[in-house]
Image (cartoon, helix red, strand yellow):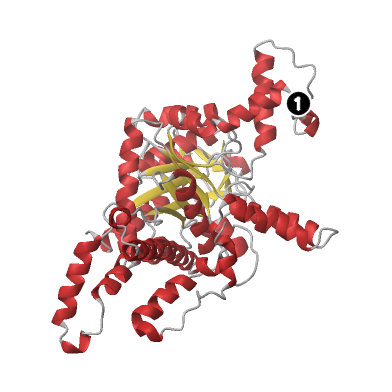
Amino acid sequence: MTYQNTISQMRDTISKGGPSWAAIDAQNAARMAIQNRFATGLDIAKYTAKIMREDMDAYDSDPAQYTQSLGCWHGFIAQQKMIAIKKHFGSTKRRYLYLSGWMVAALRSEFGPLPDQSMHEKTSVPGLIEEIYTFLRQADARELGGMFRAYDDAREAGDEVRAKDIEKQIDNYETHVVPIIADIDAGFGNAEATYLLAKEMIEAGACALQIENQVSDEKQCGHQDGKVTVPHEEFLQKIRAIRHAFLELGVEDGIIVARTDSLGAGLTKSIAYSTEPGDLGDQYNSFLDAEEVDPANITNGQVFISRDGKLMAPKRLPSNLYQFSPGTGVDRVVLDCITSLQNGADLLWIETEKPHVEQIASMVDKIRETVPNAKLVYNNSPSFNWTLNFRQQVFDAWAEAGKDVSAYDRDKLMSVDYDGTDLAVEADEKIRTFQADAAKRAGIFHHLITLPTYHTAALSTDNLAREYFGEQGMLGYVKNVQREEIRQGIACVKHQNMAGSDIGDDHKEYFAGEAALKAGGKDNTMNQFEAA
């Protein structure tokens, strides 16, 4: 609906309210409605799910059309990311948000910093989703408010051409609200618990939920040891629970991302239920590290399974967990992925120990033999040492090709001494093109960095503390923060405006007219940044 149509509709609504509504200005009310186009989180989930489905179709047609996101741990961080994207690229197209359970645990738990082991309050996840979308909607209101003020200035100056141009911008406005892929960990309990939490997350605005095949009460970060997976049927129950939550809430396009941690998980808590050879339970159990039983050596507490007509004893640890056979990780990943896609998942997530295009592609190739359009979400994780990994990949490729690598020590390639070398330059180029290369070769539809703003906050704060508390004093802030904000056109240099002071002034004028006591007068120090 256009700006003028919205005003007309609001005028009709106000007239129906009778004489008592006469003081309500239709244009002001229309502006407020346009500034808040999403009434509920479900409106957001439905809107963004459609965007994500269209992007998935576009990727199937052209792998160069992959999508990206950065992990956010606060609504303000998400807001600034999307403002920056619109500023630098003009559009939010194919750019999403990621909500990391790791960052919720580390930064949002009422218990303080926690490891990524599903110990944080489950309500903190939907709470963060709601917070993120509150900040994104405020970014819309702020930017549109600026357009409305510019429109009024143009009309007051008699510049109807400019006024029409601004009106067109308002009618074609692109919101800061984008899809969010939200981490539901391992579901925080059984399938019913997963369903209840999924509903909360969807109602907060999430159109895509990512769930992993680890045991809820043994959940570990994907890049740590000690991971324990569950039999497929238990995981599929949770996928079905999430789908039911989407359908119940009317988000028919909701996306489920099924994550497998099997590549790095050597343990399981349960022996799968099986009724016949070759069924899913039997396939899961076939990966168990088991030895044929000698009836003369049966010990107390042993557990047995049958395999190929033989009685086998799976290796059972003092933790009461069972061990998988070494070297079965890839086959388990492939089975996990195929099974998930065949039972309601839309996208895959394969947690790996390093960023290696061919390693990922080798698994995706096997998956696509059964599910040709299988697509991945991939964690470009800060847990990887990207510099060392890619320098070692180049080193190995050069050595295999017979190129002289005697000038390099493979174990010390992280050293700054190698930064200007041909090897380092080639490795950096491979890092630069990793996402495009993996999208094309390895079926990765969505690239994300889970924890980037955790690290950027730490780095920038360290730099500021070093300068401000050192000899630079106030210059450490002015030179490295404020002056750069001004020079780079960072909107937050006007922090009062970013926090909503101009929006508040608009509302004061709408509600009180000439009696409004506005904050944006000549004595507002924010005016010092107008020249910027």
Three-letter code for the amino acid on which mark 1 is drawn: Arg
Residue at image position (19%, 79%) is: 14
- Give how far across and how far down residue 309 sits, in percent: 44, 34
Please identify the residue farthest to the bottom as the structure is shown.
20
Judge whether 399 appears above or below 345 on screen: above
Residue at image position (28%, 51%) is: 253
Left or right for 368, reference 327: left
Q: Residues within 10 Å of mark 1 (few under 14, many from 20)?
A: some
Quarter-of-image position of residue 242: bottom left
Residue at image position (36%, 39%) is: 279
Numbered circles on residues, count = 1
- Give how far across and how far down residue 319 sits, in percent: 63, 55
Q: Nearer the viewer, residue 162 or 464?
A: 162
Q: Nearer the viewer, residue 361 or 422?
A: 422
- Give how far across and how far down residue 415 sits, in percent: 79, 33
Left or right for 239, reference 382: left
Quadrant where the image shows the C terminus: bottom right
Please identify the residue farthest to the front as the structure is shown.
158
Element assignment for label 1: helix
Q: Nearer the viewer, residue 368 or 27?
A: 27
Q: Is residue 136 visible?
A: yes
Please identify the residue farthest to the right as the structure is shown.
471
Q: Is residue 300 visible?
A: no
Which residue corresponds to mark 1? Answer: 410
